[in-house]
């Protein structure tokens, strides 16, 4: 297949590699810059702490990109239900244990490796183990005009047709394009703990709002689970400074009443931030941002990578009607359309986080009334819970 001036994607992680495949499948030449490609997956290795709950609509995207069957050969865990409650209250459950899957738990490294391998196999994708350095002007482009080029850390200059930054929340590409952001830090961290249990873990994910903390569980294969605590940084630092026995006890105090016995395997943490790009595209430089580079959201509902994959879904749908001359304008329109859904989700999760942390008496009453109403089996409420479960699986988002 003949290559033309490429679309350059900086960042070959899950979202960047998926975007490269979507554009290549639509007939466009793509260059991907990723300085640290994912190592080969070894089944005997312990679980990675980086785990994503990929929703059903994005599983359909992975099928379109030709990697889903490969992923089914690696470790994965389906989940059919999600549940939430206030500590001491009743469970509010969505989905159906015997119904369609809401999604799958996949290790980030496994998903990234599969996407990157598919990129390397595609004749229209060139994968560079290079780091992005700068955007520069260069004379002698089409019709003798000045054009922008990507300069890599090794000094290579790559003239591009369009540029996409999928290089994370601190995105150097976003800064180079001059795209501003709004948002705030949550002054809290997310602690992740991989544990092993003596019994299989039910195929449901859940969250408990426990005063100034949120406790959550992601089910994994092979009797494993990922336990999550969202809390203020000093609280989590206190847990991390303990020895292994102390860490085990701290987790047991938070989770043992719900899941019984477990053994801590490993632990890690990261800070939380809400950030939205003000404008996702620069017309002057023919470049934009997707994934975490465009929208970093609270991980409360596991929507981070799913929003990034929905950016890719939108690009995939729009690119089919574009050509080399129109693709830049098509990408600009697509990312501007995506900005609305991404903002709604980001601010919605921000609002939920505030609501469930509030100790204001009126907010506590409102919260409990809402839980009681949604837990009711009367009238249209069961149908509403089913709708929420379907939404959680991504089936109401545009393909």
Image (spheres, rainbow, N blue to C red):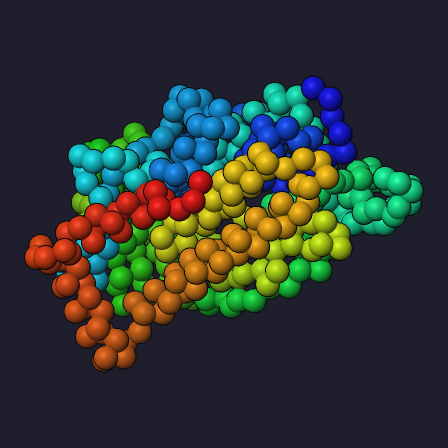
Residue 87 occupies quadrant:
bottom left
In this orientation, does residue 227 appear? no
Q: Quadrant of the C terminus?
A: top left
Q: Quadrant of the N terminus?
A: top right
Please indicate whether residue 229 sits to the left or right of residue 343 in the image: left
Q: Which one is in front, 275 or 19? A: 19
Q: Which one is in front, 387 or 367? A: 387
Looking at the image, which residue sits at the far bottom? 361
Q: Is residue 172 above or below residue 160?
A: below
Residue 163 occupies quadrant:
top right
Please indicate whether residue 235 sits to the left or right of residue 11 in the image: left
Q: Which one is in front, 224 or 115? A: 115
Residue 161 coordinates in the image, percent (x, y): 74, 40
In this orientation, does residue 18 appear? yes
Looking at the image, which residue sits at the far left? 378
Residue 373 occupies quadrant:
bottom left
Residue 26 coordinates in the image, percent (x, y): 60, 30
Q: Is residue 324 above or below residue 167?
A: above
Residue 181 coordinates in the image, percent (x, y): 60, 64
Q: Which one is in front, 253 or 168? A: 168
What residue do we see at 53% from left, 56% from top?
Answer: 339
What residue do we see at 28% from left, 36% from top?
Answer: 101
Residue 104 coordinates in the image, percent (x, y): 35, 36
What residue do we see at 27% from left, 79% from top?
Answer: 360
How many numbered circles does the render carry? 0
What residue do we see at 52% from left, 52% from top?
Answer: 338
């Amino acid at each position: 297949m003949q290559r033309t001036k490429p679309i350059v994607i900086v960042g070959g992680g899950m979202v960047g590699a998926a975007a490269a495949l979507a554009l290549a499948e639509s007939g466009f030449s793509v260059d991907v810059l990723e300085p640290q490609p994912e190592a080969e997956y070894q089944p005997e290795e312990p679980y990675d702490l980086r785990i994503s709950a990929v929703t059903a609509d994005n599983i359909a995207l992975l099928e379109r990109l030709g990697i889903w069957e490969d992923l089914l050969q690696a470790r994965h865990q389906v989940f059919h239900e999600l549940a939430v409650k206030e500590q001491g209250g009743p469970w509010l459950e969505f989905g159906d244990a015997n119904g369609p899957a809401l999604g799958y738990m996949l290790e980030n490294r496994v998903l990234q490796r599969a996407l990157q391998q598919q990129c390397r196999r595609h004749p229209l994708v060139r994968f560079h183990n290079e780091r992005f350095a700068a955007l520069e002007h260069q004379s002698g482009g089409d019709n003798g005009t000045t054009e922008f080029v990507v300069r890599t850390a090794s000094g290579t200059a790559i003239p591009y047709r369009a540029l996409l930054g999928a290089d994370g929340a601190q995105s150097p590409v976003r800064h180079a394009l001059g795209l501003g952001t709004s948002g705030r830090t949550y002054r809290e961290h997310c602690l992740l703990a991989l544990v092993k249990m003596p019994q299989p873990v039910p195929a449901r994910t859940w969250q408990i709002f426990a005063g100034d903390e949120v406790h959550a569980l992601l089910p994994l294969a092979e009797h494993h689970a990922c336990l999550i605590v969202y809390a203020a940084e000093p609280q989590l630092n206190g847990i991390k400074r303990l020895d292994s026995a102390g860490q085990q006890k701290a987790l047991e105090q938070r989770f043992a009443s719900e899941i019984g016995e477990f053994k801590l395997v490993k632990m890690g943490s990261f800070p939380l931030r809400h950030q939205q790009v003000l404008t996702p595209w620069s017309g002057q430089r023919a470049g934009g941002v997707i994934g975490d580079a465009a929208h970093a959201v609270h991980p409360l509902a596991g929507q981070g990578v799913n929003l990034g994959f929905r950016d890719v879904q939108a690009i995939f749908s729009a690119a089919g009607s574009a050509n080399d001359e129109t693709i830049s304008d098509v990408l600009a329109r697509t990312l501007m359309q995506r900005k609305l859904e991404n903002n709604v989700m980001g601010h919605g999760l921000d609002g939920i986080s505030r609501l469930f942390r509030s100790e204001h008496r009126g907010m506590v009453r409102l919260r409990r009334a809402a839980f009681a109403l949604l837990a009711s089996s009367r009238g249209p409420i069961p149908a509403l819970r089913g709708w929420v479960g379907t939404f959680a699986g991504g089936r109401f988002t545009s393909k």
